[in-house]
Image (cartoon, helix red, strand yellow):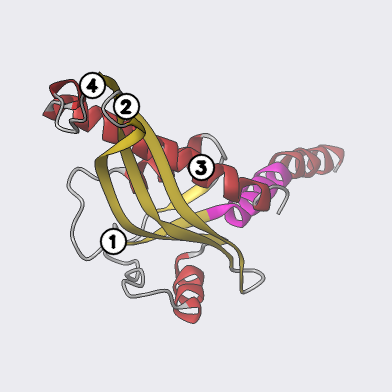
């Protein structure tokens, strides 16, 4: 009898932490629902980087939409809270990040100009859009932010000239791809910094 009691107690010691961890994992599951711009962005990896950051940095379980045949497809139209809540509950999420990207571009901008004397140009990367964090347990949006990530690239001073097409401002294709990857990682860090405080201890 004592052995049986000890055995049952030992099983409880093992099972309770497992059950607790499972419950916590379910409570800390998130999905990123992405609304792409009308014109496709080539070599775009922001969503994949965001999923990785949510897993590695924040410690969340990530549900990736549209990867399983038995999983319902994520809403692919404009923001619809009721539809997002319905989908999130179907796939077992606690949170959803709704991410809309309006565009990603690289442009040359004049930073300084003294006519006929001095000018300065800089190449900048931009990602624009918005994102919202939805808490399914509370059935509400708990935060919405603008996505306005910028990053500076090559800079060039020009004396007695004003030439935005300066060869020193040119970025080769491989260098441009590396620059865009860094721009996307910066956007991911900004998103994580905004949403993470709303995920702790929930």
Kindly report the distance in space between the C-alpha atoms of the residues bearing marks 1 and 2: 34 Å
Kindly report the distance in space between the C-alpha atoms of the residues bearing marks 3 and 1: 19 Å
Residue sitting at 29 percent across and 60 percent down? 68
**Quarter of the image that includes the C terminus:** bottom right
Q: Residues within 10 Å of mark 4 (few under 14, many from 20)?
A: few
> Which one is earlier in the sequence, the residue at label 1 or at label 2?
1
Residue 97 is situated, as x and y percent measured from the top left of the image, at: 49, 59
Identify which residue, 181 or 118, lies in the foreground: 118
Residue 52 appears anywhere in the view: no
Identify which residue, 119 or 12, lies in the foreground: 119
Q: Which mark is residue 190?
A: 3
According to the image, label 1 marks what residue? 36
Kindly report the distance in space between the C-alpha atoms of the residues bearing marks 3 and 4: 39 Å
According to the image, label 2 marks what residue? 120
Camera-side mark, 4 or 1: 4
Residue 92 vertical position relative to residue 82 in the rendered view, above or below: above
What is the span of residues highlighted in magenta in the rendered image? Answer: 15-29
Residue 15 vertical position relative to residue 102 in the rendered view, above or below: above
Give the structural element (helix, strand or loop) at label 1: loop
> Which one is earlier in the sequence, the residue at label 4 or at label 1?
1
């Amino acid at each position: 009898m004592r052995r049986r009691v000890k055995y049952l107690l030992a099983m409880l010691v093992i099972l309770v932490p497992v059950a607790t961890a499972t419950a916590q994992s379910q409570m800390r599951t998130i999905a990123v629902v992405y609304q792409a711009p009308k014109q496709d962005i080539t070599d775009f990896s922001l969503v994949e980087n965001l999923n990785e950051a949510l897993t590695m940095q924040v410690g969340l379980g990530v549900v990736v939409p549209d990867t399983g045949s038995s999983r319902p497809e994520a809403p692919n139209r404009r923001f619809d809270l009721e539809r997002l809540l319905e989908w999130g509950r179907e796939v077992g999420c606690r949170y959803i990040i709704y991410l809309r990207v309006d565009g990603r571009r690289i442009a040359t901008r004049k930073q300084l100009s003294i006519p006929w004397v001095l000018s300065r140009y800089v190449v900048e990367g931009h990602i624009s859009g918005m994102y919202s964090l939805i808490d399914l347990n509370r059935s509400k949006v708990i935060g919405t932010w603008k996505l306005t990530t910028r990053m500076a690239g090559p800079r060039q001073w020009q004396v007695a000239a004003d030439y935005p097409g300066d060869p020193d401002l040119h970025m080769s294709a491989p260098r441009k791809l590396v620059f865009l990857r860094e721009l996307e990682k910066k956007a991911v860090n900004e998103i994580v910094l905004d949403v993470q405080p709303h995920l702790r201890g929930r």
